[in-house]
Image (cartoon, grey):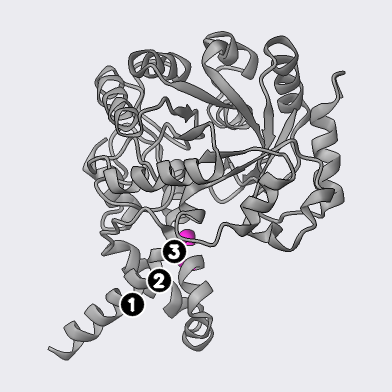
């Protein structure tokens, strides 16, 4: 499977990989976004309420874009999100 | 013989009133969790099967021996006979916690069947792979040909998802369910999945949501195969889970020998 496939899904490119259909690629990108959004919201519902929808969407999109998740356990996304927030804070400090 | 996918949302249910003959759980949900509810199900005389979501047979990450050891331990603890996962990728070398298509190509037949063999060697047993839905994919051959070549080369079983065939048929105007099934070796099928799906107009695609009742056509194919080959069937319902009464009605339909 070409690397481009997962680049599109993570949102690091909007170029549909050769041979794949655009609606299907959008569906996959959306489903991954939804999975990340639901798990983060389950643990930190107040963040979504405080940020508002458009900032929340950008935050989760950035989380997915930078993802290198390795655990077999979907619930571990909570720890990945905390690590992502810490990285974001570090990079804005420096 | 009709089973039910057991979900967290059912923890509060009085499971003795659920008319399922067996259950299925995801190992990822129970490896680290208190298994008391599952032991209670077993105590009611109904077996549990394992159906995983994270093996990523189509992915690039090495097969994780530690994870498979945990699966093996879970199987021993709950006296589980069958372990299956999807003929799909969960990501590239990383996890994205969804199921992505494996290109139906000759090179992927070799690569994926080798990975299945590795899994089977670590576990010391045969696994089953499920035919999945795909919303777009690359193909040198049909999905049924790909599935059969993989399972024969890996010498593994099939978890036959009738709903997924129906969703792919609707989305890609390919083989109908009957034609697809006629190309398979039914002796390799451990059991079948049925579920419901929804059309999503944002993508112009039917999405495999497991949020609806089972379509009549899907149920009829499952029941015909059940009658012909005595293959059990299991209902998956993951989102918008209805009442026990509604679930029992669906299960009753799957136990009726005449077409609905």
Q: Nearer the viewer, residue B141 or B160?
A: B160
Q: Where's the N terminus of chain B, which quadrant? A: top right
- Other-residue count near label 1 (Cα within 10 Å), few / some / many at <14 / 14–19 / ≥20: few
In magenta segment, residue A35: yes
Residue most extreme to the left: A94
Q: Where's the C terminus of chain B, which quadrant? A: top right
Q: Which residue is mark 2?
A: A78
Give the Cα separation between the discs numbered 2 and 1.
6 Å
In the image, residue A70 lies at what x, y percent?
28, 56
Q: Tally the marks.
A: 3
Q: Residue at x 31, y 50 (%)?
A: A8
Q: Secondary structure at mark 3?
A: helix
Q: Say the numbered circle drawn on residue A82.
A: 1
Q: Nearer the viewer, residue A50 or B93?
A: B93
Which portion, as a residue range, is magenta? A33-37
Q: Secondary structure at mark 1?
A: helix
Q: Which residue is mark 3?
A: A75
């Amino acid at each position: 499977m070409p690397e481009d496939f997962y680049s599109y899904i993570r949102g690091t490119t909007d170029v549909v990989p050769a041979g794949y259909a655009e609606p299907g690629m959008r569906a996959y990108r959306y489903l991954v976004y939804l999975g990340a959004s639901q798990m983060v919201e389950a643990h930190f519902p107040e963040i979504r309420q405080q940020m508002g929808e458009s900032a929340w969407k950008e935050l989760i999109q950035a989380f997915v874009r930078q993802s290198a998740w390795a655990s077999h356990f979907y619930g571990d996304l909570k720890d990945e999100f905390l690590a992502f927030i810490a990285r974001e804070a570090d990079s804005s400090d420096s | 013989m009709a089973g039910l996918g057991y979900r967290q949302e059912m923890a509060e249910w009085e499971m003795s009133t659920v008319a399922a003959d067996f259950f299925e759980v995801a190992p990822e949900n129970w490896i680290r969790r208190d298994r008391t509810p599952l032991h209670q199900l077993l105590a009611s005389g109904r077996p549990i099967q394992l159906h995983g979501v994270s093996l990523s047979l189509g992915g690039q990450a090495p097969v994780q021996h530690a994870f498979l050891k945990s699966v093996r331990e879970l199987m021993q603890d709950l006296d589980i006979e069958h372990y299956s996962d999807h003929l799909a990728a969960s990501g590239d070398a990383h996890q994205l916690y969804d199921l992505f298509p494996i290109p139906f190509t000759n090179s992927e037949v070799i690569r994926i069947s080798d990975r299945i063999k590795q899994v089977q060697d670590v576990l010391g047993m045969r696994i089953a792979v499920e035919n999945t839905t795909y919303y777009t994919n690359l193909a040198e051959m049909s999905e049924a040909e790909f599935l059969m070549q993989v399972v024969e080369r890996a010498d593994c079983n099939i978890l036959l998802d009738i709903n997924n065939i129906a969703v792919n048929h609707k989305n890609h105007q390919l083989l109908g369910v009957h034609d697809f099934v006629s190309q398979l070796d039914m002796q390799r099928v451990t059991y079948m999945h049925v579920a419901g799906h929804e059309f999503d107009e944002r993508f112009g695609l039917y999405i495999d949501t497991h949020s609806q009742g089972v379509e009549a056509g899907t149920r009829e194919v499952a029941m015909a195969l059940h009658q012909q080959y005595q293959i059990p069937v299991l209902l998956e319902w993951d989102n918008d889970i209805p009442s026990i009464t509604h679930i029992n009605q669906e299960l009753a339909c799957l136990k009726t020998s005449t077409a609905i």
